[in-house]
Image: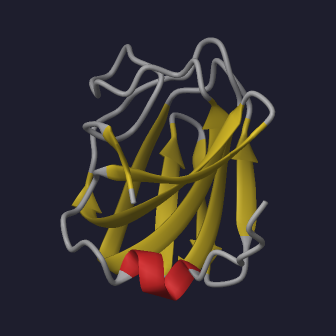
């Protein structure tokens, strides 16, 4: 077995597109994903899983129908399943998400994710 740490900044430097998840590792039935966001995304809900947002750089807002939360660099927030949300960022924000491998990443308000697709980097 080869032992090598994953450098998050190096992985983030490999892409510039927004709202496109990049898988960087797996653990049990979960995937670790990086994403860059800017601007607004649409309202959507995760019916079958909680959603973890970890801010690596910048800050983002998660709007809910009854409030909002700001997540800044070095912070994380867990959105419980079944809660409708709308992510956004005024400026570019880098995030890590941890979610089950079974999550289908197709986008849209009734799907299980917030980005267009997954790509390994």
| In this picture, residue 40 sits left or right of residue 56 | left
Q: Does residue 68 appear in this view? A: no
| In this picture, residue 67 sits left or right of residue 43 | right
Q: Position of residue 41 (x, y in %)?
A: 28, 46
* 68 to 55, vertically: above or below: above
| Residue nearest the viewer, comparing 17 with 93 | 17
| In this picture, residue 116 sits left or right of residue 73 | left
| In this picture, residue 44 sits left or right of residue 49 | left
Which quadrant of the rendered structure holds the N terminus? bottom right
Please tell me in which quadrant of the rendered image residue 114 appears: top left
Name the residue located 73 percent from the left edge and 64 percent from the top edge.
Answer: 76
Name the residue located 56 percent from the left edge and 79 percent from the top edge.
Answer: 8
| Residue nearest the viewer, comparing 19 with 63 | 19
Q: Name the residue at the front extreme.
A: 1
Q: Position of residue 119 (x, y in %)?
A: 33, 46
Name the residue located 71 percent from the left edge and 76 percent from the top edge.
Answer: 4
* 118 to 120, vertically: above or below: above
């Amino acid at each position: 077995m080869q032992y090598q740490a994953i450098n998050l900044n190096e992985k983030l430097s490999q892409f510039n597109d927004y709202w496109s998840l990049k898988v960087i590792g797996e653990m049990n039935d979960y995937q670790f994903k990086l994403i860059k966001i800017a601007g607004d995304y649409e309202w959507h809900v995760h019916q079958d899983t909680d959603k973890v947002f970890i801010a690596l750089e910048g800050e983002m807002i998660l709007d809910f129908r009854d409030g909002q939360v700001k997540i800044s660099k070095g912070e994380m927030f867990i959105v419980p399943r079944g809660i409708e949300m709308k992510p956004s960022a005024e400026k570019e924000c880098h995030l890590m998400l941890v979610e089950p491998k079974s999550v289908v990443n197709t986008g849209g308000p009734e799907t299980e994710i917030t980005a267009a697709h997954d790509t390994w980097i």
